[in-house]
Amino acid sequence: MVNDSPCTRPLDKFESVFTIEGARDPRLPNFVQRIHDHPLFNHLQPFSDYFGRLLIYAVDTCPSSMAEYNKYVDAHVNVPTGPDSVCREQGLLELDDGDVVLARNVDAETPDFDVPQIVVPKKPFTREDLDKLIKLRQSMIGPDEDLKKYGTTAFERDGRSSQVRGGRCYQIGLSYQRWRLLVNPSADGKFCQDQDPALMMRRMVLDDLIAIAIRSMKLYLPEMYNTLKRNSELRNLPVVGPEDNFAFSNVQINWASAVAHNDESNLSSAEQMGQSGGAHRDTCDFVGGVSHITGYPRVPANYEAGRFHWLEVGAYIRFRVDRPVAAFFSGLRRHGGTAPVLLLARQ
């Protein structure tokens, strides 16, 4: 039996109990909010320019307790189906630009050893980034008439796309063959002589998306970035995309078509994206690194653009119609997403 989540107590005058409305599962974490500088982020000043909320939750780090909690999450905590209002009713924590979630040992006396779990950078996209993302997204989707005719994107039809994880998911960069213990270029990116337009599109994906992630990582997770850089140089690991990328070996593109409000079979995206669409852990991820997600769905204004959930934390971020969103997290934690939803009330 899993007990209620450990009580997260404020450690000093800069921390206070953070209240979440809704019928939140008592076994999910509760939080305190730190309203002043944090030892991990003292290099980012002024505070309000880089952060929205710093939210901290206590963790019982006893291995048996952690294993029992993970077992409970696997069995009982799933990606919610339905519109965004369902998440508020369930008391899930919505994150936005500048929010950071940290874990703290339940017996800690100082915040010095808090561990970042989710980092949502504040204003991570420059005007140039936005222009590049809009153009790249349009070229990957293709003309609207072709999308309606074939039901899939230009990226998926260009002859290079190779699905992974049983759904509309495609890897670019390096691929890991678990049974051979080998790393090699993914099938999508291999070529003999000339680089065709589809290959050049994939090169743009690697260059543009990884550059955005690395820039934010240097700001918010500099110690991790420098450690990964030393590890990369020591092991002579190949660099994918930008020359300063020592953190990411590939980019995975996930596609999900919009669904109706009452289409529960597809709302979790599991039907469309296979393993990557449902709740899962990326069990081969490096424990010392993080994943980075960029979401920028192209849907009309009368749609909710979908969400990305971190199930062990009971938190999520909403994708937006008007702008992209981005976040760092550990893929070893259970996570999953939803497809865009057409709201019946707005039809």
Image: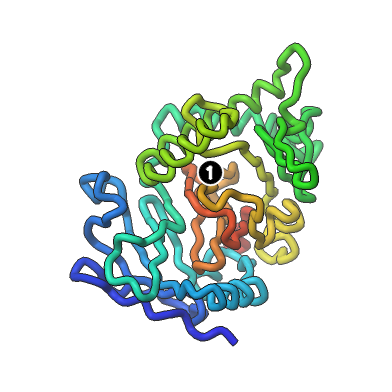
Q: Furthest residue to the top?
A: 194
Q: Quadrant of residue 118?
A: bottom left
Report the side of 50 relative to 335 (left or right). left
- Residue 139 percent location from the top left of the image: 64, 28
- Residue 73 percent location from the top left of the image: 60, 73
Instruction: Tell me which residue sits at (32%, 55%) in the image.
Output: 52
Q: Quadrant of residue 65?
A: bottom right
- Residue 19 percent location from the top left of the image: 35, 75
Q: Quadrant of residue 337?
A: bottom right
Q: Amino acid at mark 1?
A: Thr
- Which quarter of the figure is the N terminus placed in? bottom right
Question: Pointer 1: what residue?
Answer: 294
- Which quarter of the figure is the C terminus placed in? bottom right
Q: Nearer the viewer, residue 20 or 261?
A: 20
The residue tagged with tag 1: helix, strand or loop? strand
Asked if one can make out residue 260 in the rendered structure from this viewpoint, the answer is: no
- Residue 6 percent location from the top left of the image: 43, 80
